[in-house]
Amino acid sequence: MSGREILHKMKEKVGLGSSASDTGKGKSKMSKNITHGYHLVKGQFNHAMEDYVVAQFKQIEDKELGLFAIFDGHLSHDIPDYLRSHLFDNILKERDFWTETENAIRRAYRITDSNILEKAVELGKGGSTAVTAILINGQKLVVANVGDSRAIICKNGVAKQLSVDHEPSKEWRNIRDRGGFVSNFPGDVPRVDGQLAVARAFGDKSLKEHLSSEPDVTVETIDEDAEFIILASDGIWKVMSNQEAVDCIKHIKDARSAAKHLNEEALTRKSTDDISCIVVRLH
């Protein structure tokens, strides 16, 4: 086995992906029928891959957490890489994580963003969106996000969005109240201060006065109707709807194959952005 193959096996085991065509899979020890797979594809832009993923199960005493995340960087690969290494650690350090999970996640998002801003010289300019999903004992799913990476769940064949797309056009009042503006140039998407196409993100120190890093948090019960979860960067959502994504993979039982197929479908539909996708099969 080559050094590159050994490195890939190590990354797959701990559920970390970041290279141009990373892929991996894993399964729950507590619930054998819960599996996950991820796949990344570098976009057509002339810069390094800026998407990073986390996909792993973690045992904490008698509990099991499924930790899943997509970090989509803009003008930066250092900041999403930092998030991959630190955000879940910060969440789990919160003393009331088990009792006040939503509040703990919100605090950890704020603390992590403050840490990134303090390290701006080291991490550089730019920022990152994030969508995180924590599956607790296979029964409770807690989703948080800033930006436009998205989480959806399929129940009885129907897609339900669990995250919120933070678009400048929807949050222009908050941006204006912070002293910023939203541009609407012909042929372009709305942008914060004419620059950033999302209204919330980690980092972006030069825009931070006008930009929020406050996550939206959603809690979903995993019942018998729940079939699978998709987390993906906007490289998928720019070219297909939630229901189209569900329909694309609903008959693919292997989670990694499903993630790869979804990315390939996005490429067929002419997506040019970095694409990262995690699929968690529940039943």
Image (tube, rainbow, N blue to C red):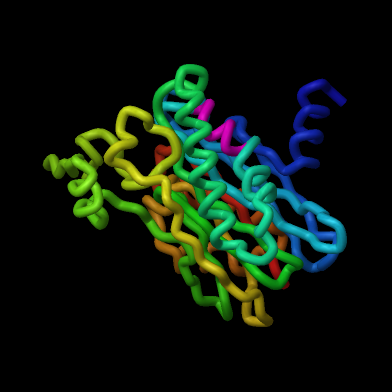
Extent of the magenta region: 77-84
Query: Is residue 78 covered in magenta?
Result: yes
Quadrant of the image containing the C terminus: bottom right
- Camera-side residue: 223 or 211? 211
Q: Is residue 245 visible?
A: no
Q: Position of residue 121 (x, y in %)?
A: 46, 17
Quadrant of the image containing the N terminus: top right
Query: Is residue 271 covered in magenta?
Result: no
Residue sitting at x 66%, y 59%: 96
Q: Position of residue 62 (x, y in %)?
A: 86, 63
- Camera-side residue: 88 or 15? 88
Left or right: 239 with respect to 193? right
Q: Quadrant of residue 138?
A: bottom right
Q: Quadrant of residue 181?
A: top left
- Camera-side residue: 28 or 212? 212
Q: Position of residue 191 (x, y in %)?
A: 24, 41
Residue sitting at x 48%, y 47%: 233
Left or right: 178 with respect to 146? left
- Camera-side residue: 86 or 197? 86
Q: Position of residue 205 (x, y in %)?
A: 37, 29
Q: Is residue 279 visible?
A: yes
Residue sitting at x 66%, y 63%: 252
